[in-house]
Amino acid sequence: MSEETVPQQGGTGQPKGLLQQMEELMAALNADLSALDADLQAAGSEREVVEEGQAG
């Protein structure tokens, strides 16, 4: 794939480098995974509370 087929836009009008694009994508992925982990942790703790209530 050539650079001509990949749209490159930056806030300053200059094209972003591949490394910068990858860093931004990794940061976004990391934020999404952190949010997912928090959601799963919350769901897990809610489930434990429900299971303890049913056992007693």
Image: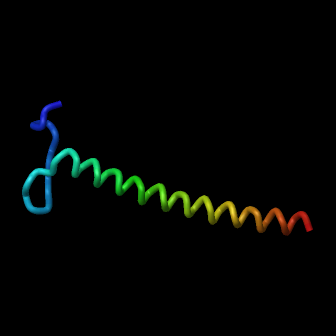
Q: Residue furthest left?
A: 13
Marker count (numbered)? 0
Residue at screen point 55% across, 58% down: 37
Q: Is residue 4 left or right of residue 49?
A: left
Q: In the figure, 16 relative to 2: above or below?
A: below
Q: In the figure, 3 relative to 16: above or below?
A: above
Image x and y of residue 17, in percent: 16, 48
Q: Is residue 38 left or right of residue 17?
A: right
Residue at screen point 77% across, 68% down: 49
Residue at screen point 14% across, 48% down: 8
> Can you say which quadrant of the picture contains the C terminus?
bottom right
- Figure colour scheme: rainbow
Q: Is residue 36 left or right of residue 9?
A: right
Image x and y of residue 1, in percent: 18, 30
Image x and y of residue 4, in percent: 9, 37
Q: Is residue 37 left or right of residue 11?
A: right
Q: Residue furthest right?
A: 56
Residue at screen point 14% across, 53% down: 9
